[in-house]
Amino acid sequence: MSLLEMLQKNAIPDKYREMSVEEMEARVREIKEKLGKKLFIPGHHYQKDEVIQFADATGDSLKLAQLSQENRDAEYIVFCGVHFMAETADILTTENQKVFLPDMRAGCSMADMADIYQTERAWSKLVEIFGDTIIPLTYVNSTAAIKSFVGQHGGATVTSSNAENMVQWAFGQKERLLFLPDQHLGRNTAYNLGVGLDEMAVWNPIKDELEYEGPVENIKVILWKGHCSVHENFTIANVEAVRRDYPDMTVIVHPECSREVVAVSDMAGSTSYIINAIEQAEAGSSWAIGTEMNLVNRIIQQHPDKHIISLNPHMCPCLTMNRIDLPHLTWSLERIEQGEEHNIIKVDEKTATFAKLALDRMLELA
């Protein structure tokens, strides 16, 4: 099947663009009631409100995959997130459960910055340089193929919540680590654990080379040259503007932001860390949040007793995450109701086996 034919096959019918919001919401409720426990809809924190209102559970990607794994009653898991998240859900669920992605175009630019071919080439060259002194770690925001590669080579996955614990574990296994695919989370985590910036190198997968000045034997962490297109758009200038306009405001950011931004912020942590910090904050407190805009707007709505703004007022929501919308959710559920198999995310057995190994190594330490 050609790319054009595949896109046409997965293109949403016009009727869903013509339906009113009320009609689509009614259909989603109707199908949810009809399917009952057979249907499970996990919704990532960055989803639009029009979708998140129908989520049976909300959370980060790993939490939602784990909840999918625990839900043995669900035959149909309609994952409202992006492709790598649905892959992880498929890896952790059983053979009789099917994972659907409402729009197959919902990918992740960060995950796409490390493909398996680049990673295998990089590993060969790094082993030539460092021998058997490296262990790979991958952020869960990566493809199943990368998780599988890491699992095969003795490594594990990490989340933004447990990254420090996993990096410490990795250093207990080997002298050095390769951190995929987000250089900023890797750099911020290693720095917090006392690794100097001068002990960190960057692997450039486009040039296929190590970026580092100095003796290579000093390198402890090799960072993959990848990033989150949302969080990299928060800048030092954004923080300086908040300091100028709101001197008493607390700046809290996600560790996918650059090292420079994290360094000048007041607090940094995972999505759950940010949500919990705002929930526990005193009424009347002021916050500038450096993370995805849909989540920031939702936090603002949920906490009218606090003054909350986005660290970057011109920030756009995550564009790929926003491909999952109410029309696509309605279309996906109607096709399930009609018995049609579509947009199913299926990871092959070999890839899934080693990817699960990487996930299990992390979960055993949780």
Image (spheres, grey):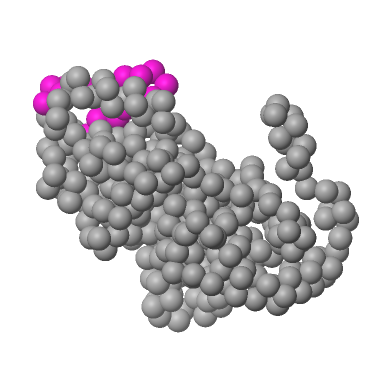
| Residue 286, placed above or below residue 284 | above
Residue at 86% in and 49% down: 14
- Rendered image quadrant of residue 334: bottom right
Is 308 placed left or right of 356 in the picture? right
Q: Is residue 313 above or below residue 223?
A: below
Q: Residue 194's spot in the image, x, y percent? A: 15, 47
Q: Is residue 170 above or below residue 131?
A: below
> In this rendering, does residue 125 appear at all?
yes
Q: Position of residue 168 (x, y in %)?
A: 17, 51
- Identify the residue at horizontal 82%, vertical 70% (top origin): 22
Residue 188 pos. (x, y %): 29, 47
Relative depth, front residue between 228 and 179: 179
Q: Quadrant of the N terminus?
A: top right
Magenta residues? 200-217
Front one among 318 and 13: 13
Q: On the image, which quarter does residue 181 sit in? A: top left
Q: Is residue 105 left or right of residue 243?
A: right
Q: Nearer the viewer, residue 344 or 268?
A: 344
- Horizontal and vertical percent for residue 173? 13, 44
